[in-house]
Image (cartoon, rainbow, N blue to C red):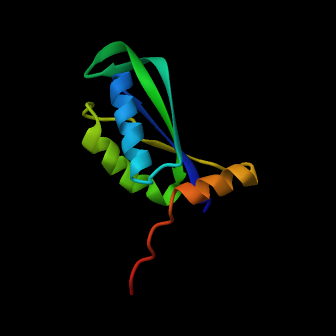
Amino acid sequence: MNDWAIVLTTAASETEAEAIAQALIEAKLAACVNLFPIKSVYVWEGNTEREQEWQLTIKTRMTQFEAIASKIQSLHSYDVPELIVLPIEKGSAAYLNWMNAQVPTENPPSD
């Protein structure tokens, strides 16, 4: 399994997106988080919604997904935040080495 992934989530505001990004970086769960404004169209509770949101593109290790999901859910204003993982199949060695230095591997399970 590839070790690196991109996790996608959205936030209701720039302030919320920044808080989530900061928490993930400080906890060393992500090497980098990109934030950008988007417009989302979706169905929620039977109604079609159109909302301005902030997309977070989180670069991390695949093994950190559960910890990231938990952190996002603890900080997020949505009942059901987006949590999608996309594996990084390839990347430049220099960039992946930099990511490797930013996000530690999970501790191996003890016997």
**In x, y percent, where is residue 25?**
44, 46
**In x, y percent, where is residue 81?**
34, 35
Report if residue 90 is visible in the image: no
Classify 8 as above or below 13: below
**In x, y percent, where is residue 69?**
36, 48
Count of labels shown?
0
Classify 25 as above or below 33: below
| Left or right side of 38 for 90 | right
Q: Say which of 65 and 36 sits in front.
A: 36
Classify 62 as above or below 23: below
Report if residue 109 is visible in the image: yes
Classify 2 as above or below 68: below
Tell me which residue sits at (30%, 22%) in the image.
44
**In x, y percent, where is residue 87?**
59, 49
Tell me which residue sits at (34%, 23%) in the image.
12
| Left or right side of 107 for 87 | right
Tell me which residue sits at (44%, 53%) in the image.
29
Considering the image in quadrants, where does the N terminus appear? bottom right
| Left or right side of 63 for 96 | right
Considering the image in quadrants, where does the C terminus appear? bottom left
Q: Say which of 73 and 23 sits in front.
A: 23
Q: Say which of 102 and 60 sits in front.
A: 102
